[in-house]
């Protein structure tokens, strides 16, 4: 293994790697991120290798598994370079056709291309796909180009050049000042300026300091950090080394959640490779700077995403928050100065050192600079990871990148910031994405979760769901969080079950205020956000649940009933056959009816009723119509020939 003992040796080795690579040589990149692996990417990779070998093309074509490029909705994703031909939802059986048509004959397999649902146009190149067009991919851009298990791939794309620059031509103070000047804010939730946090640790008198990667990504629907760790681990590692150099730390940690086995595997491999090349360990690149890295796996507690709880867990104790009389960047891990930033924050650092703070600040709003990665999930056409410039509107993210709401449904709200975030309604879609902008709207940036909700979503139930999650994840150390959230969840559950009463909203507001003001850590202080934001923008839904015992979204099980419209029922028998509770009575040419005593409100009848009939409807807040008398249940009419919209 090559030992790189100077910046010159690293650059020489980089040129040696590049000299062995032909930029015109076809390279088949297959996403090997966890999402695509779950969809069969491993089989696709093996099929490509076998087919390339079979066709005698091994010397002419490269094949590699890469990191996640973001378009998870359409995985497994295959990109063929240098033409950048992008195929989606590729299966192992598609591989022989791709090799024969695209690799050998330079033809396009059109059925595997992205087709714009609005225009019907097909996109050959990855950059032409509407999902990618409006993005600005700075941190994610190399995921699909790099074999995540190869340090040489990272070096070939300029990897560790920021470290070379810092150790050879910048002092530690200059690195710190460049990060401060960039106004890089922590991408893990609070948005605290990274440079100021680093400066506090550097100036602390204690000589032993630590830098830590927070990869305890526990937000429902969030997978930004996982994708970076799995796909480009060396970028985070390089950022961590730079942070250590800037503050005078010689020891770093990756705190990775137990549920990310592929991320843990890849970061451990990256550390071993960097050590073998002399980019970690003693006297890095002959600079005199020593640095080592340790990987620690968390046990899955959501609260360990909080800085002091994470550090307590790292110390081998129960992961509970502690009072911040002194900030953790001054007294953190083992009571020593400790800089904690999340994965995405560290991954931005090499770009800032390479390109300069002025380059970084050209993108974004006045107070939020650079790009931000979001996991776009929920009731959205294109789910996946998106990287956008700070300042892009929510509307552009949801409609230009996300492709809007599927199945002709209406947009209702977007939930940002993870379980402690808030819900932003349609009238706020013009809001620019930024730390302060989202906070003023009653939500937060968080780590970057973005869950889209449509018209069928009950906002009271959304608040109940997230409060329940936070109740279960509370460490229980302080009363306002432990007991306050439990009571909030109890009241919200009662409201969704039709047991709400006058005064419940006021009680919830009091409990929320107490949690915000008196909780020990950020989990408890931000936990009421789901309730407060939904009450702020959807108070009418709370009042409908309490006063009218009605769920406007027709979602809350205890507040709805199912009814078969006799004017639309064509006695097709599908609902009768599929009902798991045997609650439907009917036969051929006889209008079906639902027995409310037997009905479990599972919704199967509503789902299976053909759209052209739309006979099954949901009812809330009003009496269920009387069943059709037995003598009038016989059908003597033809089935409709045209498609009609399904009833709600």
Image: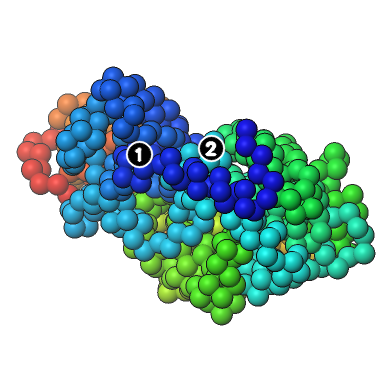
- Left or right of residue 529: residue 288: right
Say whether residue 257 is visible: no
Q: Which residue is mark 1?
A: 27
Residue 141 image offset from top left, x and y in percent: 45, 54
Q: CA distance from mark 2 to mark 1?
A: 15 Å
Say whether residue 352 is visible: yes
Residue 301 image offset from top left, x and y in percent: 72, 42
- Left or right of residue 63: residue 276: right
Residue 77 image offset from top left, x and y in percent: 36, 40
Q: Is residue 581 above or below residue 307?
A: above
Report the quarter where the N terminus lies: top right
Proximity of marks 2 and 1: CB atoms separated by less than 8 Å: no
Residue 35 image offset from top left, x and y in percent: 46, 38
**In what element is the residue under mark 1?**
strand
Q: Nearer the viewer, residue 164 or 298?
A: 164
Residue ranking furthest to the bottom: 366
Q: Which residue is mark 2?
A: 150
Q: Residue at x 43, y 28 (%)?
A: 42
Q: Residue at x 50, y 69 (%)?
A: 390
Query: How was this image coloured?
Result: rainbow
- Left or right of residue 252: residue 37: left
**In what element is the residue under mark 2?**
loop
Q: Is residue 174 above or below residue 271?
A: below
Which picture quadrant has residue 517?
Answer: bottom right
């Amino acid at each position: 293994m090559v030992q790189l003992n100077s910046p010159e040796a690293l650059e020489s080795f980089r040129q040696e790697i590049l000299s062995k690579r032909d930029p015109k040589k076809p390279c088949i990149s297959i996403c090997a991120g966890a999402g695509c692996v779950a969809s069969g990417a491993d089989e696709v990779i093996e099929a490509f290798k076998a087919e390339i070998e079979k066709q005698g093309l091994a010397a002419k074509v490269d094949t590699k598994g890469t990191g996640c490029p973001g378009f998870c909705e359409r995985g497994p994703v295959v990109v063929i370079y240098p033409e950048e031909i992008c195929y989606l939802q590729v299966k192992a059986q598609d591989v022989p056709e791709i090799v024969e048509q695209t690799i050998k004959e330079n033809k396009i397999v059109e059925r595997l291309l992205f087709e714009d649902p609005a225009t019907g146009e097909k996109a050959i190149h990855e950059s032409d796909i509407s999902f990618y067009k409006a993005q600005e991919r700075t941190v994610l851009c190399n995921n699909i180009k790099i074999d995540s298990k190869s340090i040489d791939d990272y070096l070939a794309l300029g990897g560790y050049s920021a470290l070379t620059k810092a150790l050879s031509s910048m002092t530690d103070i200059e690195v710190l000042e460049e990060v401060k000047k960039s106004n890089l804010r922590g991408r893990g939730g609070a948005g605290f300026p990274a440079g100021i946090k680093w400066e506090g640790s550097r100036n602390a008198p204690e000589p032993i300091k630590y830098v830590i990667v927070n990869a305890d990504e526990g937000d429902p629907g969030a997978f930004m950090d996982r994708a970076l760790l799995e796909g480009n681990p060396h970028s985070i590692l390089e950022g961590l080394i730079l942070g250590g150099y800037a503050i005078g730390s010689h020891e770093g940690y990756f705190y990775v959640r137990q549920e990310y086995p592929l991320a843990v595997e890849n970061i451990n491999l990256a550390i071993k490779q960097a050590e073998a090349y002399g980019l970690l360990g003693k006297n890095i690149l002959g600079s005199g700077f020593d640095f080592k890295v340790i990987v620690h796996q968390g046990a899955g507690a959501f609260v360990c995403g909080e800085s002091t709880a994470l550090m307590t867990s790292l110390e081998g104790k129960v992961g509970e928050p502690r009072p911040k009389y002194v900030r953790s960047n001054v007294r953190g891990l083992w009571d020593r100065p400790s800089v904690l930033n999340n994965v995405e924050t560290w991954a931005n650092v090499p770009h800032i050192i390479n390109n300069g703070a002025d380059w970084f600040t050209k993108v974004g709003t006045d107070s939020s600079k650079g790009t931000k990665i979001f996991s776009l999930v929920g009731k959205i056409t294109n789910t996946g990871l998106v990287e956008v410039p700070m300042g892009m509107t929510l509307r552009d993210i949801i409609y230009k990148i996300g492709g809007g709401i599927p199945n002709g449904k209406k947009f209702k709200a977007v939930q940002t910031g993870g379980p402690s975030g808030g819900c932003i309604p349609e009238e706020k879609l013009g809001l620019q994405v930024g730390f302060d902008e989202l906070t003023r709207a009653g939500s937060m940036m968080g780590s970057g979760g973005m869950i889209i909700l449509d018209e069928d979503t009950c906002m009271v139930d959304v608040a109940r769901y997230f409060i329940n999650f936070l109740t279960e994840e509370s460490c229980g150390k302080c009363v306002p969080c432990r007991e306050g959230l439990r009571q909030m969840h109890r009241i919200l559950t009662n409201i969704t079950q039709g047991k709400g009463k006058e005064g419940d909203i006021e009680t919830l507001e009091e409990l929320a205020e107490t949690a915000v003001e008196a909780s020990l850590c950020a989990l408890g202080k931000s936990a009421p956000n789901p309730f407060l934001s939904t009450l702020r923008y959807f108070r009418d839904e709370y009042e409908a649940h309490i006063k009218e015992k009605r769920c406007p979204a027709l979602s809350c099980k205890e507040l709805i009933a199912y009814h078969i419209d006799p004017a639309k029922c064509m006695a097709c028998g599908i609902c009768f056959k599929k009902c798991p509770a045997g609650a439907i009575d009917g036969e051929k040419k006889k209008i079906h009816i639902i027995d409310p005593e037997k009905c479990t409100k599972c919704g199967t009848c509503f789902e299976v009723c053909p759209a052209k009939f739309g006979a099954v409807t949901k009812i809330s807040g009003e009496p269920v119509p009387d069943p059709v008398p037995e003598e009038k249940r016989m059908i003597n009419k033809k089935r409709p020939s045209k498609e009609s919209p399904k009833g709600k």
